[in-house]
Image: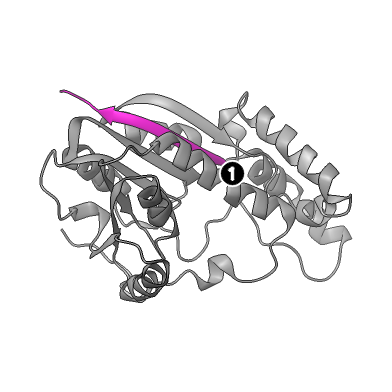
Amino acid sequence: MDLKVDLDWDDEEVVSGVHYLDTVFLFNRMTEGTQSMVAPRKGEWILDIGCGKAADALQLAECGGKVAGLDPSGRMLREAKDYLTKCDSAVALVRGIGEALPFKKHSLDKVVCKGALDHFPDPQRSIKEMSQVLKPEGEAVIAIANFESLSCRFGRASHSIIKKFIKGDHPRTPWEIPLDHTYKFDYPMIIGLVERHFEVKKILPISLLWTTPYWGKIISIPPRRISQTILVFLDMIARRVPSLSDVIIIKGTPRCD
């Protein structure tokens, strides 16, 4: 398998800079939604693929799971080790890639991949690997950004107008994938990839309007209580229009065929 993998990747560009309320809300909902979908039980073997600094892996372990975090980046694993040491956690850290998981077939109860699949060189191979390392009744939970969300569509349509009438710096174009991404997922694409190897049991759409031009600044103007109410309301609407949501969380069990 000839794959180009960044073995020294870090999340500095992801977590740095100003985070407006919509970004904080989205990240929190994405974590809450993923953890809720995983629903770790005591003694279950859980693999966090693309674990980064292992913050999510730690939460799963605190709920009773026996957790391993996997990441190809030596830098991220070093940071994860420091973080877990400070928290006195027993999470195991493994260096590896999603396309070749170093685990026996049918050995894990659950796998989770939150916000990482679109960094992988071969997402389809990674999803297949997830299905193979899971027990027949096991569950995979995948959370991924939707690059055909309402905000991406609105931003793409309004970009030329905004540039024409508003001078100076402009927000990044949300419909274009960041440099550290390899794939640009949308709702039909991610559902189609997952369904090749899994029976989809649940889909949880998260948030609307994230990264819409100037939305972060606008939603930060009202009192925080009002802004939070608006964001919660938009999050509820996202359930009705999953193809337009900002993030898609999917849970499935391995196909028997």
Horizontal side of 209 relative to 142 (left or right) equals: right
The C terminus: image quadrant: top left
Asked if residue 176 is positioned above or below residue 249 in the image, the reply reads below
Q: Quadrant of residue 89?
A: bottom left
Quarter where residue 153 is shown: top right
Q: Which residues are magenta?
A: 247-257
Image position, residue 212 (x, y; %): 72, 49
Label 1 CA crowd tier, 10 Å (few <14, some 14–19, many 20+) = some
Q: Residue furthest left?
A: 104
Q: Is residue 167 magenta?
A: no
Task: List the residue tagged with mark 1.
Answer: 29
Measuring from the top left, give residue 39's x and y in whole percent. Answer: 40, 36
In the rendered image, residue 222, in percent from the top left (x then y), is placed at 89, 49
From the image, which quarter does the N terminus lie in?
A: bottom left
Q: Nearer the viewer, residue 44 or 110?
A: 44
The answer to whether residue 186 is seen in the rendering is: no
Observer able to see residue 122: yes
Vertically, is 75 above or below 35?
Answer: below
Q: Nearer the viewer, residue 254 or 107?
A: 107
The structure residue drawn at horizontal position 88% and vertical position 54%, both measured from the top left corner, is 221
- What's the residue at 18%, 54% (across, down)? 100
Residue at screen point 35% across, 51% down: 61
Badge count: 1
Question: Is residue 252 magenta-colored?
Answer: yes
Q: Which kind of residue does numbered mark 1 sit on?
A: Arg
Q: Secondary structure at mark 1?
A: helix
Query: Residue 150: x percent and y percent?
Result: 66, 38
Identify the residue at image location x=40%, y=56%.
58
Please identify the dominant SS of the magenta region.
strand
Instruction: Give the side of residue 127 with respect to residue 35, left or right.
Output: left
